[in-house]
Amino acid sequence: MMRLRSRLARAVAVGAALALALPLAACGGDDAGGEADQIRILVYGDATNKVETQIVDTFNKTSKVKAVLDTIPGADYQTKLQTIINTNQAPDVFFNWGGGSIAPFVKANLLLPLDDMIAKDPGLKENFLPSVFNSAVVDGKAYGIPMRGTQPVMLFYNKKVLADAGLTPPKTWDELLNAVNVLKAKKITPIALGGGDKWPTQMWYQYLYDRVAGPELFRSALGGDKSVWESAESRRALELMRQLTDAGAFGTNFDSVKWTDQGSPTLLSTGKAGFELMGSWAYSTHQDSKPEFAKNDLGWTAFPSIPGGKGDPRNVAGNTNNFYSVLKKTKHPEAVAEFLKLMYSDEFVQAQLGIGNLPTTVNTEKFLDTAGNPEYSKFQFDMVKQAPSFQLSWDQAYPPAATTTIHQAVQQYTNGRMDADGFIKAMQSLQAG
Amino acid sequence: MAATTLAPRTTTGERWAVRRPGGGVTLARPGFAWALPATLFFAFFAIVPLVLVVVLSVTSWAGIGDVEYVGLANWRRLADDPVMIDSLWLSVLLTALGVAVQTPLSLLIGVWAAGQQRNRAVLSAIFFLPLLLSATAVSVLWRALLDPNFGVPGQARWLFGDGNLFGSRTGAIAVLVLVGSWQYIPFHSLIYQGAARAIPAVLYQAAEIDGAGRWHQFWHVTLPQLRNAMITSLVIMVVGGLTTFETVLILTQGGPGTDTTITAYYMYQQAFRSFDFGAGAAIALLLVVVATVISLIMVRVSGYDKMRSTLEGL
Amino acid sequence: MTRHRPNRLAGIGAVAWLLVVGVPIYVMLSITVQTREGYGDNGPISLPDTFTLDNYTGVFSQGFGRYFLNTVVVTASVVAIVLVLVTPLAYAIVRSRSRLTGHVFRLFLLGLAIPAQAVVVPIFYLISTTGLYDNLLGVILPTAAFALPICALILSGAMRDITPDLYEAMAIDGATPTRVFLRLVLPLSRGGISTIAVFSALQAWNGFLFPLVLTQSDSTKVLTLGLYNFQTQYGIDIPGLMAAVVLSMVPVLLVYLTARRALIQGLMGVGGK
């Protein structure tokens, strides 16, 4: 035993001496700070980064100022961004969700308004769908250029489950409630809900509020008018939500189910649930995990209309798009402008469609037939194009600081731990965007 | 073991022997300089930041923009914050439950594994496995295992009902205690295993001559000899329990609602989710204070700071 | 320890615990050999009806080789720093009569109670202003610093087992503190030293918070962050994630298999003797 131990100790000592020298040598070459003739671009790190890489390569072929792409793994992107944005590690151009995700930076005077760039090249505005472009307008100034795909939230359903129960996709609230009752009687969870993630629950609220009160209610709330949360419309939306939970629409264990660990999508694809309200990325998730379900049995439709509601039933909610915003301190605004122009190029649109994203440029339409599933892409594109209003998800419309409060409020109202007054009070405690 | 390896060295060392005038032997003791490098290093990365945290706790700062002095505003707000008060209670509760579950099991497994039989070596090799996984990996694994529809609860409805483990306070707390125990019991049983192996066999032989049974031996020989090991294990458990973070972040995110928002997670949430670094710093300080007080009490009660080897008493 | 009669109760308990540990590990392994489709059909705990190793190759094509190398560099460096700093520190704590050293020991005891997440914001700014942000060294230094208190405690505990007459014997030889340290203290605390080596190595290997906050690019990513990458809202790949978990465990497992005794001895030493 003694010998073994001393051998380990010796091995450790040698390894230690080597290792101490190694990082010093290895890290010497790495450069953390920005070079004089480059622009640093920071994006959310995930599987779709290959398009960003491709576009950066294209840009670097002709540009003297070189673009460098950095990624930050998804879940922590916003946190990381806010920590570095005011340091010398800050990028020149960065990915964001528009709305509240950039509002604190605008307030801190860190971002470059893009209006001058747009004046020089109107294409930077005209080539994008207005409902999407406007998500990154703060105080009347444009701060972002759309750079990935739009992700509207839709009501997905299992065609086979609905057919077996003699149901058709619901167009109205009453049809949805009826479907809930029919499926429940057949011992199927009517609607899969990843309540453990909280943001899927919030999707129900943002649609219900939009259908009942129209987009104006939330816009006023965001603008600082806290009284709207007490309005009759607000209470009506909460009542409808209660109607749904009382009918057992989500089953009883939804707070233990997550979208992010494949729990709720599997409920839908295995026929244990009939519906799921989810962002457009649900299609590619199902296609990866169960291609023949995505091909044959996955259906999608718009959120049902609500009788007497003020909101246009064509309104959409979800992630309007992602945006590139520019920091004021960038040394190469001209190069950045050239880079941003690539976001409406044919190459960009085709590359995005190729990986399943749906860009929101006006030239997207002519390439829709090249998408992986043209029918799905066209449905979405028309939905977004025709929508009078595209409500950005609540947790992205508010600054990031509000997210925890919103998520807790929707979770606790949905599982019955909080009543309508508690929910209203929680939403009124939010700082305006 | 020590004496045998050292013996030859002292004899060969004979020729360096120096007779001092006056005949007395002065022991060469290391000065403070020996502790200096480690102290400076630690001070730079732990004490200096801690001082900065104190400064931050009386300011308002969102990570961007200016740092603004606000006096005791953060503290006053926390004193009125039900989530904050609840989080302290929860931290203590989770730590206590963790200790209550892990200590007896670790002790039994450790003492059992200290036996020399061959099958024990194989089994304890398997028992060791959870230790090789990071907290991130463990949490991800258990989240999948405990899925209400497709995991264990879905297959055992008679036990779990609708399997809504993460939807109730009791369920979520139980999950955190279970997962923490699964991950850390192997480590603590190793501590006990090592200490149990070091217990001199003569003590057991003497007990057997007195006619003591297995339980009697366990209570009157094994347990008292494991005192130091137990103190170390408890200190690590308590400090580890109070600062649990990844497990909560990945398994429950402090939910449902705020039902598992322990202080360490609440701090992270305030600072890095709500970007209220002032409040986050105040909570961090509170956490440091609570952990310090508890470990000080444990150290005092156990005499850990003056700890001597149990062997010395023989 | 002498045991004559077989202890049935203990045997049953051991098997029960074997199940508690073994079943989740088995489930993890079985998930990694399923296709995403098979996993979607069967869920985590049923028997796999598909078999594939694609999840493993997929993990490598996502840059895990680089993350792996980074983690090795971080771990080895942390162990080196800890050993170089803690051995003289523990020696001073045990043998020094200086009052300052007594305060130092208390400082490290208190240091045990400083959670890394409590000070992570100021540490970010320290690292950032010294230009070490997004550099492996920036992860190594604070990780090593936060391993110091527990290692100092463990090693000074081990060094206390060296009996006073051995010191006296060396003093008769007229040995200087340096000589005592090199000739007596280091050889006799090999057990404690391998304990803190193992302990700090595990901490560095599994470290999450410092790499999360102090690095950002792919070239400085470590394994735990690579695992974290697998979980995003838009792409769920549980079999891939589990395969990454298993792969991240392999190096520790290899060390464990080749140096199992030393490793276990090392960890057991945490409790002192």
Image: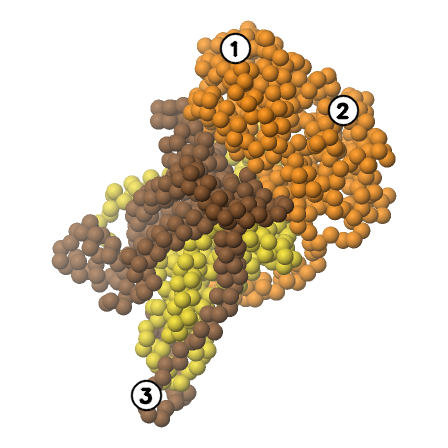
Chain colours: A orange, B brown, C yellow
Could you give the CA–CA distance between mark 3 and mark 1, rounded to whole angstroms? 96 Å
Q: Name the residue nearer the viewer: A27 or B193.
A: A27
Q: Chain letter of disc 2?
A: A
Label 3 crowd (10 A; few <14 / some 14-19 / many >=20): few
Kindly identify which numbered label has been placed on residue A129: 2
Q: Is residue B262 above or below residue A351?
A: below
Q: Quarter of the image containing the C terminus of chain B?
A: bottom left
Which residue is rendered at x = 55% and y = 53% of the image? C122
Label 1 crowd (10 A; few <14 / some 14-19 / many >=20): some
Taking the image as drawn, is residue C125 in sight?
A: yes
Q: State which mark lies toward you, 2 or 1.
A: 2
Q: Name the residue nearer the viewer: B302 or C46.
A: B302
Q: Secondary structure at mark 1?
A: helix
Taking the image as drawn, is residue C144 in sight?
A: no
Residue that badge 3 annotates: B24
Could you give the CA–CA distance between mark 2 and mark 1, rounded to whole angstroms? 34 Å
Q: Are marks 2 and 1 in contact (CB under 8 Å)?
A: no
Q: State which mark lies toward you, 3 or 2.
A: 2
Q: Are marks 3 and 1 in contact (CB under 8 Å)?
A: no
Q: Secondary structure at mark 3?
A: loop
Kindly identify which numbered label has been placed on residue A177: 1
Q: Quarter of the image containing the N terminus of chain B?
A: bottom left
